[in-house]
Image (tube, coloured by chain):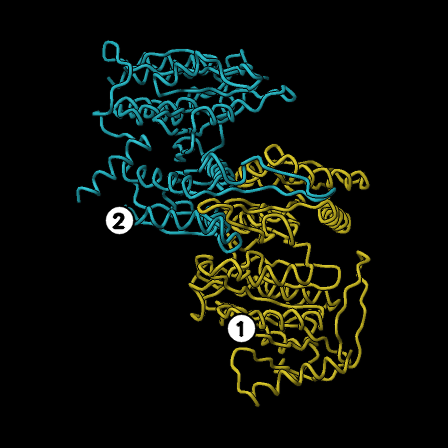
Chain colours: A cyan, B yellow
Amino acid sequence: MAGGSAWRSTVSRVVGALKTETARPRTSIRGMQTVTLIPGDGIGPEISNAIVKIFEAAKAPIQWEERNVTAIQGPGGKWMIPPDAKESMDRTKIGLKGPLKTPIAAGHPSMNLLLRKTFDLYANVRPCVSIEGYKTPYTDVNLVTIRENTEGEYSGIEHTIVDGVVQSIKLITEDASRRIAEYAFEYARNNQRTSVTAVHKANIMRLSDGLFLRKCREVAEQYKDVKFNEMYLDTVCLNMVQDPTQFDVLVMPNLYGDILSDLCAGLIGGLGVTPSGNIGANGVAIFESVHGTAPDIAGLDMANPTALLLSAVMMLNHMGLHSYGKKIQAACFDTIREKKVLTGDLGGKSKCSEFTAAICEKVKDAE
Amino acid sequence: MAVSNVALSLSKVIKPLWIGSLGNTVKVLGSTFVNYREKVTDTREYITHAVKHGDRHTVTLIPGGGIGPELFNHICDVFRYSHVPVDFEVVNVNCSSTPEDDINDAIDAIRRNGVALKGNLDTNHIMPPSVNSRNNLLRTSLDLYAYVMHCQSLPGVQTRHKNIDIMIIRENTEGEYSNLEHEIVPGVVESLKIITRANSLRIADYAFRLAREKGRRRVTAVHKANIMKLGDGLFLQCCKEVAAGYPDIIFDDMIVDNTTMQLVSKPQQFDVMVMPNLYGNVVSNVCAGLVGGPGLVPGANYGHEYAVFETATRSTGNSVANKNIANPTAMLLASCMMLDHLKLYDYANVIRNAVLTTMNETRLHTADLGGQATTSEVVQFIKTMISQGPLTAGLAGGGHGG
């Protein structure tokens, strides 16, 4: 089985999915690990601040390196992220990002798209877990959507064939499909998930989704410890809104992933409480909140840092710092469950700083 | 025209006897002689046709796979019981055979009769791409460009969300379902999504006309034009153009991922929704799930000339087939929609009321609703409700008629 284990270690390196603390050490100063922090726009700076405070209270061994990613035009007119931001990410390999605004008619592509292309962020991971204390019609949701993030329907290739007829091209490649399938199974294995479901529409898109499905099946053969099944997109939607507990890990191409990950976010309470992580090709991982910049409440100490906080918890787990992750998550959930100090969007009247302070208290108490 | 159709019908009956070929069997119930074709103009000024023999209508019936055959038996039973003046021309389609003769015969039958009731035809996605989805082939051949689903909360069914009343109108012929794929180099596949101005205008126009006809106040276009700027951008542009001609109806738009998120948190905010093909697939299934599942909601496919009625989620239901546990509600309500289309409103209302009354009885909920009733029990109760209605009041004992 030497070939098998060599293959597995190659896969682990390539997908960068780490669980144990014997991970390759990153820039380690006094046992601290450095993370690139991108506060973002709008409410970004204040919620990033909240995270930094909570991590301090938890004494997490994280050192923050703050960077700005406003697009600049490089030589040749090509839009890119500032070189110091890129250098920082390449070095630290881990990023935490707040919401970025994309001004209309700015002349440059969306910032999220630029980041995705710069670091080849091929997997978007969203764990959706019901938050006790934040009631939605759905309880006991506990699933993960893993979405291929580089190709598919979002390839951006469109043309007008004749006046009034437009074609949009959906691109599916063997390599990208295999890569995302491998990540999904690695994730399932490393996070004790029992099954992976491939979501597709191969009855209609026989070649493209068929290729995606074939790659998933091939990869499944190498992960016999994880159950694999396939389901049509419409069947998943139908069943998801009736009984989301039947799903565990879902892997799918870009568009279906976009729709399903937002649907699942809606099940647990919306983008204000949903974490998200993007995994890149060279071990780079950027964790982010997926809500907007909320310019109307920016600077008013009204924002809810939960989404960014849960993404930061995802980041801690990714780095192998599970104990800190658990502590902070528990403090966050407890604060929400008590309902004494909640921000406006969660149904309360408290300020962001009060909410943050409450979590810090709980984190300190948990020592 | 009439003579050739008779010859066609007779040839189908004779062929199996002479050649003994399996697969393509056409049973014609009722008269095989066509008396006349009646052109029916509906309120939307589209010409659709329906076939009548004397007082009786002929409708094509495609049982399909899974739960189709058993549910259609029940429908025929209920129709006979209610003395509905409809005869079914049954066309069986064998989904696993490669030649397209079966589905072409079904399409011919629908062209002949104008109206059909259909179960889902399984698509085996392991087969090569040259074998098209039979359902899709049927829709595109007959240009059934509008898929309409009316999604309503039913009082007798327990769901997480209440007071849902959404009409979904989905473009049914192009978009992602264009069946145009190729492998550029080994390992790289392109799939083309086609959006045309003509079809987008057509479906938007249909949506606004329907909204006005039904007294609805708002139409929401669902799209992903921030990413697919040309394709969905064109669709959105067409919707806006049509909306300008309906100032009495509010028009807005929403991106599809936000739409699904809103649907699971606050579905009551939606009124009428119009969208391209794939998003329609997603949204209609989400909505069906919100009101109680695939067993409850009917769907209709309309074209300028033809109409085909089926369940909203187009499920084959293989896992519950032939166990007498399938929920007949969706298929029965679809047949009521068909009766409305044929202007047999009285029959439609009686059967529909019977079905909805039965839905209020929790002891008559089938497995998909968390109950234990069998399909036969549900149908029997529906027939009892029908016998108490105005239609059969004058008939002796409500027994089986002709």
**Residue depicted at 58% across the width and 45% down the height:** B279
Residue B397 visible in the picture? no
Amino acid, disc 2: Lys
At which x and y percent is residue A295? 58, 17
Q: Nearer the viewer, residue B196 or A159?
A: A159
Q: Residue at x 40, y 30 (%)?
A: A133
On the image, the x and y values in percent for residue B350 come to 67, 67
> Which chain does the numbered disc 1 sit on?
B
In this orientation, does residue A235 appear?
Answer: yes
Name the chain under label 2: A
Q: Which residue is mark 2?
A: A224
Residue B380, disc: 1
Q: In this rendered view, identify the residue nearer to me: B54 or A157.
A: A157
Amino acid carrying label 1: it is Gln
**Both labels 2 and 1 in a single chain:** no
Report the quarter where the N terminus of chain B lies: bottom right
Would you call the spot at circle 1 few (<14 residues within 10 Å), some (14-19), or many (20 or more)? some
Single out the mark in the foreground, 2 or 1: 2
Q: Is residue A159 above or below residue A305?
A: below
* Residue for point 61% across, 36% down: B228
Outermost residue toward the left in this view: A1
Secondary element under disc 2, as helix, strand or loop, is loop
Whole-angstrom CA distance, mark 2 to mark 1, is: 48 Å
Coordinates of residue B364 in the picture (x, y in percent): 49, 64
| Location of residue B390 with respect to A310 vertically, above or below | below
